[in-house]
Image (tube, grey):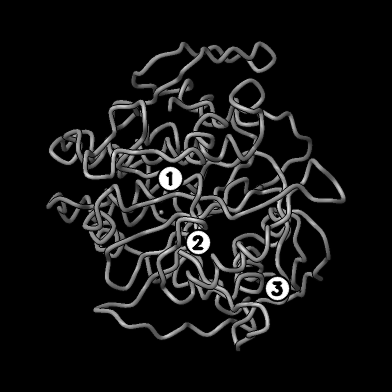
Amino acid sequence: MSDAVPERGQPDAGAPRRRGRVRKRHTIGKVLLATTLVLVMATGLGTVWLYRHLNGNLNVLDPTAQLSNRPDKVKVEGPQEPLNILVMGSDSRDCAGCNIDNLTGGGQRSDTTILFHLSADRERAYGISIPRDSMVDRPDCKTEDGETIPGADNVMWNEAFGLGGPACTIQQFEQLTGVRLDHFVVVDFEGFQGMVDAIGGVEVCIPEPIVDPAHGINIEAGTRKIKGKEALNYVRERYVVGNGSDIGRMKRQQAFIGSMAHQVVTAGTLARPDHLVGFLNSATKSLTVDPGLQDVWKLAKLGVEFKGIGLDKIQFITIPNIPDPADPNRLVWKDPQAEQVWQKVARDEPLTKKLSDGVISAGNLPGSGSSSGSGSGTTSEADKQALEDAGLCT
């Protein structure tokens, strides 16, 4: 798929220590959870064999002992509890074609972080992206062996994952936002292509050809379904699309996930056992989850709740940001807007229009076939600019 933090001059027990800063680059795995949640086990496919097989695919990790000084969860009115789920994309860059930015160094990295917030009344959901190059003050965190990884000031957001994996990213998120997490999901980048291929591709609208000889990418313009390596290249390309920024690439990934969710829910995927089983098999192989989501029925329940909201009410935004005054190639979170977003998430309050400029809705993607028809049918100038910056049709 979402926000909250204490206001200035009004600190509370769960208040963040210091607001983060942001930078530019690419991310992908995070966005895949929205689709997984919308789809997982939404039919009565569950034979004992399939259930055990899909459960066996899941990797379960419990980071509880590694977390400290966690913010309290704010009590809100509603028929259910609001849910905050942190999605991280894991990218080893060792797979064929994965290292599109030609970055050096091995090991796992997280180029994608998205908070999915599901409201207590189950009437809205937000996916809030955090750019990987956000400059933040990273808190101390612990390894699985209990050793402390010292914190550091003014470092990139995704450094935490490289140093200590999901637990350090969770610790960093909670301390900087004041939002208590209920669950986390890590999506492995290599599983992305299999998920897209299993549902027969994802429809996109590309206004101009994407030609990047340096990275071997050549994608025709037009509205059509893409899959395989072409889909992989589409969501990772940044240099010759839109405004060439990582923020633009993030918006394109958000739109791709929205279209992917639409494909799963409305294009007959749920009625095609071959497509559905293939998607679930690829998805579960790609996921690392907390114990609260350790079997497919729990994921199914969560998926049905997202599906019940309606695609037009699942909205993707990027945490408000500006260029880092110390380095124009980096970003910092823009306060007070960023702080207000986190405050509203923590309190399960709707985001105001001012805080959600540049929104991308899973049910209304201009220029593509994924318009649900249930939205307003209008696109603000800020939203149009976000789509243009991402190299999308408007």
As measured in the structure, the alpha-carbon distance from the residue carrying label 3 to the one carrying label 1 is 27 Å
Q: Which residue is mark 1?
A: 32
Q: N-terminal of the two: label 1 or label 2? A: 1
| Quadrant the C terminus occupies | top left
Tell me the crowding category of disc 1: few under 14, some 14 to 19, or many 20 or more residues within 10 angstroms, Cα based: many
| Numbered circles on residues, count | 3
Taking the spot 53% from the left edge, 29% from the top edge, the residue there is 388
Q: Note whether 94 is above or below 321 in the view shown.
A: above
| Quadrant the N terminus occupies | bottom left
Query: Does 126 sit left or right of 21 as displayed?
Result: left
As measured in the structure, the alpha-carbon distance from the residue carrying label 1 to the one carrying label 2 is 12 Å
Of residue 263 and residue 326, the one placed in the foreground of this image is: 326
Q: Which mark is residue 142?
A: 3
Q: Which mark is residue 266?
A: none
Of residue 36 and residue 244, the one placed in the foreground of this image is: 244
Q: Which mark is residue 86?
A: 2
Of residue 189 and residue 37, the one placed in the foreground of this image is: 37
Three-letter code, disc 1: Leu
As measured in the structure, the alpha-carbon distance from the residue carrying label 2 to the one carrying label 3 is 18 Å
Taking the spot 39% from the left edge, 33% from the top edge, the residue there is 194
The secondary structure type at the circle numbered 3 is strand
Taking the spot 76% from the left edge, 55% from the top edge, the residue there is 135
Three-letter code, disc 3: Lys
Query: Does 273 sit left or right of 111 as displayed?
Result: left
Residue 161 at what x, y percent from top left? 66, 57
Taking the spot 59% from the left edge, 32% from the top edge, the residue there is 95
Residue 93 at what x, y percent from top left? 65, 36
Residue 200 at what x, y percent from top left? 29, 26
Three-letter code, disc 2: Leu
